[in-house]
Image: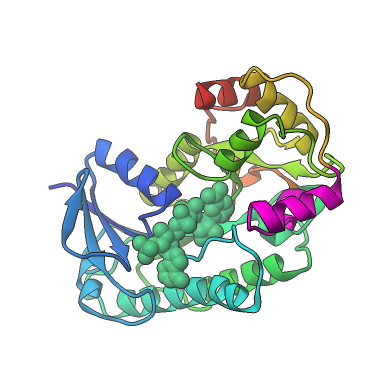
């Protein structure tokens, strides 16, 4: 049996991809889920938890190699008071209870890795490396409290790494799916001003970043987990249309985006209208090599 990695909230888009990636590398993968326990699917074992309280699941942490925490209510929703509360509490509670589980281990994990977000930089066109100033607004506040909670307590034997993840492009889910649908129905024009940046990366590159954080002791602290070639929304949408064989499409002005997001997509318009221009400085300094740096090639592969 390989070394065990526990993926908290690993039933979603990023967790499922990392699980298969790790299994191919002979790791033993356990996912903590609010869903059914004691099932094994595609080589992944599922253990039940509630993301808030210690329970039987905590025995999975004993002696494991690493915990990666993906838990969090999706931000892809309308920001009602209740949704905002759940977006924040699901993230903070999972960090706290995983920390409690590590504390009660006699053989604690080597590393505790947290999936965070580049949203901490707010809506900005300035190039952001890890040291760039934070923005303002709800998403920024969530990210700040999330990071503060994660680093509030350190462990004597467990490294803590937080990856601020960008706009992840993959085949089965994630933010690319709704954009593909828009393009398919000839609605994939520039969104709003089109000047907002999309800091994108391919999910395989992200999985390699997680692997580095798991296996390499020098990874410690906060890293921007995004590709080295962010683009504007205007460029992104044109490249996606080209990849899907669609010609010019009229732009979607901001009021249209607000209406479409609230009424048809039942999501927060700011997700499409804001953006950030981030670079993975610390990964590049560490010698990390990206497989996917050209957006056209990447999208062509993913939509084929
Ligand atoms: N995908 C991206 O492009 C991206 C970019 C930046 C940051 N991130 C962050 O990375 C993390 C993982 O992203 P993802 O795309 O894999 O998300 P996802 O598909 O929504 O998966 C998140 C998992 O969290 C669990 N969860 C949801 N609401 C919860 C709640 N209220 N309490 C406890 N657990 C809850 C769910 O697992 P169960 O239902 O099985 O319990 C779900 O499968 C998230 O925190 C996200 O904000 C993602």
Q: Residue at x 61, y 27 (%)?
A: 293
Q: Position of residue 9 (x, y in %)?
A: 38, 61
Q: Position of residue 110 (x, y in %)?
A: 33, 60
Q: Residue at x 25, y 74 (%)?
A: 58
Q: Is residue 70 visible?
A: no
Asked if residue 3 is positioned above or below residue 159 in the image, the reply reads above
Left or right? Give the position of 209 relative to 146. Answer: left
Magenta stretch encompasses residue 272: yes
- In which quadrant of the rendered view does residue 81 lie? bottom right
* Closer to us: 15 or 256: 256
Q: How is the image coloured?
A: rainbow
Left or right? Give the position of 154 relative to 283. Answer: left
Query: Taken as a whole, is the magenta stretch helix, strand or loop?
Result: helix
**What segment is highlighted magenta in the picture?**
253-274
Left or right? Give the position of 124 relative to 291. Answer: right
- In which quadrant of the rendered view does residue 43 lie? top left
Q: Residue furthest left?
A: 1
Q: Residue at x 36, y 47 (%)?
A: 16
* Closer to us: 191 or 129: 191
Q: Residue at x 41, y 53 (%)?
A: 12
Q: Position of residue 259 (x, y in %)?
A: 77, 54
Q: Position of residue 5 (x, y in %)?
A: 28, 55
Left or right? Give the position of 282 relative to 129. Answer: left
Magenta stretch encompasses residue 122: no
């Amino acid at each position: 049996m390989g070394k065990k990695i526990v993926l908290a909230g690993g039933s979603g888009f990023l967790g499922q991809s990392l699980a298969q990636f790790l299994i191919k590398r002979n790791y033993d993968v356990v996912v903590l889920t609010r869903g059914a326990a004691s099932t094994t699917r595609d080589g992944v074992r599922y253990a039940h938890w509630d993301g808030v309280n210690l329970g039987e699941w905590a025995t999975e942490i004993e002696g494991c190699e690493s915990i990666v925490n993906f838990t969090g209510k999706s931000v892809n929703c309308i920001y009602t008071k209740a949704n905002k509360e759940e977006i924040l509490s699901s993230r903070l509670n999972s960090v706290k209870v995983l920390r409690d589980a590590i504390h009660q281990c006699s053989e604690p994990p080597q590393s505790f890795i947290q999936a965070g977000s580049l949203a901490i930089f707010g809506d900005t066109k300035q190039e952001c490396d890890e040291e760039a100033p934070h923005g303002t607004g709800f998403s920024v506040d969530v990210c700040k409290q999330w990071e503060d909670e994660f680093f509030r307590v350190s462990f004597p034997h467990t490294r803590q790494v937080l990856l601020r993840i960008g706009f992840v492009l993959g085949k089965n889910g994630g933010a690319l799916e709704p954009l593909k649908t828009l393009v398919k129905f000839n609605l994939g024009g520039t969104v709003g001003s089109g000047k907002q940046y999309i800091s994108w990366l391919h999910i395989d590159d992200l999985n390699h970043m997680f692997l580095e954080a798991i296996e390499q002791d020098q990874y410690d602290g906060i890293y921007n987990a995004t590709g080295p070639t962010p683009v504007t929304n205007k460029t992104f949408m044109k490249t996606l249309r080209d990849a899907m064989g669609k010609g010019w499409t009229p732009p979607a002005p901001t009021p249209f985006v607000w209406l479409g997001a609230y009424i048809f997509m039942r999501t927060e318009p700011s997700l499409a209208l804001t953006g950030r221009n981030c670079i993975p400085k610390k990964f590049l300094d560490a010698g990390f090599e990206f497989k996917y740096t050209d957006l056209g090639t990447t999208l062509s592969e993913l939509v084929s």
